[in-house]
Image (spheres, rainbow, N blue to C red):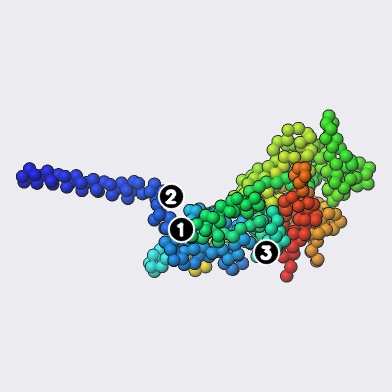
Amino acid sequence: MNRPLRRLSIVILIMFLTLMAAATYIQFFAAPSLNADPRNARTLYREYGVNRGPIIVAGKEIVKSRPANDAYRYRRLYLEGPAYCAITGYFSVAHNSMTGLERTENSVLGGSDPRLARQKIQDILTGEDEKGAAVSLTVNPKAQAAAVSALGNRKGAVVALEPGTGKILALVSTPGFDPNAVAAHEIKNAVDSWKNLSADPAKPLLNRALGGNLYPPGSVFKVITAAAMLESGLSPDSQVDSPTVWTPPGTNISVKNDGGICGNGSGKTSLRTAFVQSCNTTFALAGKALGAEKMISRAEKFGFRKKLAVPLPVRPSRFPKPADDIALAMDSFGQRDIQVSPIQMAMVAAGVANHGKVMKPYLVDKVLSSDLEVLDETEPKTFSTPVSPSTADALSSMMQDVVNKGGGKAARVPGINVAGKTGTAETGKNRLPHAWFIGFEAGENSRVAVAVLVENSGYGGEKAAPIAQKVIRAVTEK
């Protein structure tokens, strides 16, 4: 071979080896980073172009995929969007993002979960498009609808639980939003919708039910203080301190009762009376006497400071170590430094309803294949046992008196024993307080416990209790 041909052969060989090396590098070594690159349109089309599985409530699809005439091939459709937005979240191709159950259950809905291996093989063999699995929820559609309707467009939240299992029967945060607008494939429309929602001062994207904001609980926290008092050896008939006004020594701060005198005004009354009348002075003095360690420990047993996913992430409720006895006294009737989520207070109510046992809340009941075969089913699990059965029964008895004789009368349901506690949480000067109500169907096998928050609306007995009544009635009526 002459010299020019030899040189040409060497150049061609080098080029061939370089091409092989480049192809090997791109296909094997660089593939993970290239697939993860958000600019990679093919990855986006593959991820977001799957025929995602539906989200189901009581056998009815509330979210499904439908064919789309674009590169993504399928569009998500939220059939009852605003009513379920706090649960479903959105799946957006325009923003390359997802929230809510669309995010936490993405591997199932998108078809990549290992439990779907057999279904994927079947789809390949039959030449069908890849499909995701269905997620069936624990939600009671009547309870959800009742909560949405009763809250209206006010800022607030409702969480309803099945005490014996932890099933979430309703989870609502208002004002809500329409996920269809954010999930649109038309980029400009989707971006404009998200910008408008983000700029809205009412914060519709905030999940108030799960701790997007934490709130002072006001008097609903007295259920926890009363639990600590009962666990320390008191009974509902025990005499407790109940001054009309209490001024901590060395301060000019006065703790007063919203209703003025407590009991007969003598400075002593039964724990039951102090609870029904929601006497601030009684619970301030009791918390101070019990001490920070016992108070914080009791709150933690109900779920404070604990991580929780339902599977949506829940922000832990706060009970920081009080700076002094005055702070502890204020904390003990739900003001000062205590900050809670509605789901946390629903867990408190459910724990009392379930005779002292709090079950772990959960939203996903079953995972179903595309042909509706059950692939997985959630088993109820105990979250904690914060009080004894006798303490829970005593709390239930006092909470029934709140509804039958006290400020919770608006929560009464004909033919049903309802237990509850109102709360009115101060939020500062020139601002209406947050209205709270927590309660449950009282009985051996309670079917529902509920927590209601209405921001800056007034008294809990007037603004929150009627909402709880509608939710309890929706679950218990035949």
Image quadrant where residue 334 sits: top right
Q: Nearer the viewer, residue 467 or 237?
A: 467
What's the residue type where badge 2 is placed? Pro
Image quadrant where residue 406 sits: bottom right
What's the residue type where badge 1 is placed? Tyr
Callout 1–callout 2 Cβ contact below 8 Å = no
**Location of mark 2 (residue):** 38
SS at mark 3 in the image: helix
SS at mark 2 in the image: loop
Q: Quick one: label 2 or label 3, which is nearer the N terminus?
A: 2
Furthest toward the top, the residue is 250
Residue at the image position 60 percent from the left and 50 percent from the top: 199
Callout 2–callout 3 Cβ contact below 8 Å = no
> What's the CA distance linking mark 3 and mark 1?
30 Å
Residue 277: x %, y % from top left = 86, 49
Relative height, residue 314 to residue 253 (above, below): below
Q: How many marks?
A: 3
Residue at the image position 52 percent from the left and 57 percent from the top: 190
| Within-10-Å neighbours for mark 3: few <14, some 14–19, many 20+ | some
Is residue 272 in sight in this rendering? no
> What's the CA distance linking mark 2 and mark 3?
38 Å
Q: Nearer the viewer, residue 128 or 290?
A: 128
What's the residue type where badge 3 is placed? Ala
* Left-right relation of 261 to 172: right
Badge number at residue 48: 1
**Location of mark 3 (residue):** 145
SS at mark 1 in the image: helix
